[in-house]
Amino acid sequence: MKVLLTGANGYIGRRLKHKLLEDKSIDLRVMVRNKSSLSSNLANIEIVEGSTFDIDSLKNALNGVDVAYYLVHSLTSKDYEQKDRLSAQNFLQIAIACGVKRVIYLGGLGQKETASTHLKSRIETGEILSSNPEDIQTIWFRAGVIIGSGSASFEIIRNIIQKLPIMITPKWVETLAQPIGVDDVIEYLHQGLYLSYDKNLVVDIGAQQMSYRDMMLKTAQIMGLKRYLFPVPFLSPKISSYWLAIFTPVPYNIASSLIDGLKSEVIVQNQNAIKYFNIVPKSFNDAVVQALHEIEANQVLSRWSDSFGDVWEKDHVKDIANAVFVDRQVRDISHVDSSKIFESFMCIGGENGWFGYDFLWEIRGFIDKLFGGYGTNRGRRDSCSLRIGDGVDFWKVVDVVQNRRLLLYAQMKLPGKAWLEFIIEDNKLIQSAYFYPNGIIGRLYWYALTPAHFLIFSNMIDNIIKRSNSNLQKK
């Protein structure tokens, strides 16, 4: 069976890719915007570069395919509803032309009449993909709150519980949902390949019904924390969104979409999961325990932010060459094992900090959050391992060359484009901060921060070398 996986760099896509690679009865093809973003088992994968907005690349990706997974979403775009519709229409049209037999789609629970804008867009995508049952079959899975290490929902719950012993909450905490563990979602998607059914099918999946209040209190109990929630009727969605943005890793636009979706119940509407699949979903408690264990053991396979940010189509080499401002620090490292230097700067960010003046980074992160950015509390997936596509606070990893280079692209809110690069070359460590300003505001921004840059970047490179000398890879 020839299987196409789209969205292979997303939260679900990365995990499903690993599951499909274990299935020796299929030939796996993935469609990604940039093949360098795939970091494992490339020998067993056929790779097609492109997007669902490029008809030619879609034809290349879907040609000869039996079953195609559609895990594409444009939530971070301002016009994501229109993009989602166009993407689904393109995919359906080319899939039919290429003779694809089955499309498997993962959407969200909810009823269209009461759904938020975000959930309604997910429902419309499913409707489009299911609109030609005489030409192609669609298996449409619908899930609500997904509990797993790195999922947006769990990251929000965990961070709020950790940071706030007493919470004044909006009334939506009493809304009912049916959470499900991420491993169970992956299992449903995998078994969808082999479902003996030849018509369109909507499969609602979830474990027990519970309120968001119950989810938070049960998570606190599992974490050994005592927490108190006091729901009030006067907290607006906007205030709630800012609250989540400040105290959790998600930026304002994501928090706003999630908060908007919490006003309506997301519970199972049909029994097709029980009727057609032999899967017993984990309890909420078991899913939380597993997620916490993966976080503590640095075994987070994917995060909600993996595919966020329009960075893959950028020509970073050209953009860096055109940078107007460069802060470059160079140090001789002939007396140090270069592999230890590489290991050292690969640990930057997150809980490890930025190797000095962390309070300045925290201030910058807080300002970024206020303007709707990621801030520094997004952290990183793993304490000392990075791959292309990983988030590092308000940076994105866009290139990694083993024992030689790390390139980070700034996803913070700022008047221009910025990169931070570490290169080992000719027994030297070269650390460069590049900035391409937007007009006069961008130039004033750089000049205003020049004194801080002098302290931060000089201290950073020196501490990278010190850490490599002491083999200290964590705080």
Image (cartoon, rainbow, N blue to C red):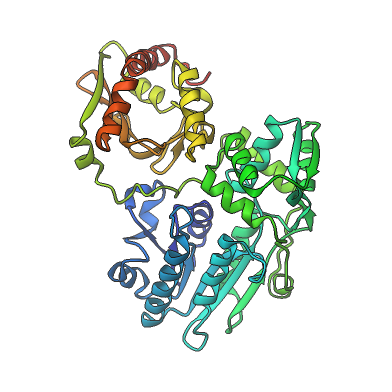
- Left or right, residue 108 beside residue 8: right
Q: Quadrant of residue 245?
A: top right
Position of residue 267 relative to residue 368, above or below, is below
Q: Quadrant of residue 197?
A: bottom right
Location of residue 300 in the rendering, given as x and y in whole percent from the top left corner: 56, 41
- Check the image and name the residue furthest to the bottom: 134
- Left or right, residue 71 beside residue 409: right
Q: Residue at x 71, y 31 (%)?
A: 164
Location of residue 439 in the rendering, given as x and y in whole percent from the top left corner: 25, 37
Q: Residue at x 31, y 71 (%)?
A: 55
Q: Residue at x 52, y 85 (%)?
A: 133
Asked whether residue 449 appears in the rendered view, the answer is yes
Image mark count: 0
Position of residue 463 relative to residue 71, above or below, is above
- Left or right, residue 122 beside residue 79: right
Position of residue 361 relative to residue 104, above or below, is above
Location of residue 26 in the rendering, given as x and y in whole percent from the top left corner: 47, 67
Q: Quadrant of residue 392?
A: top left
Asked whether residue 301 appears in the rendered view, the answer is no
Location of residue 322 in the rendering, given as x and y in whole percent from the top left corner: 18, 37
Position of residue 171 relative to residue 379, above or below, is below
- Left or right, residue 31 beside residue 198: left
Closest to the observer: 441 or 333?
441
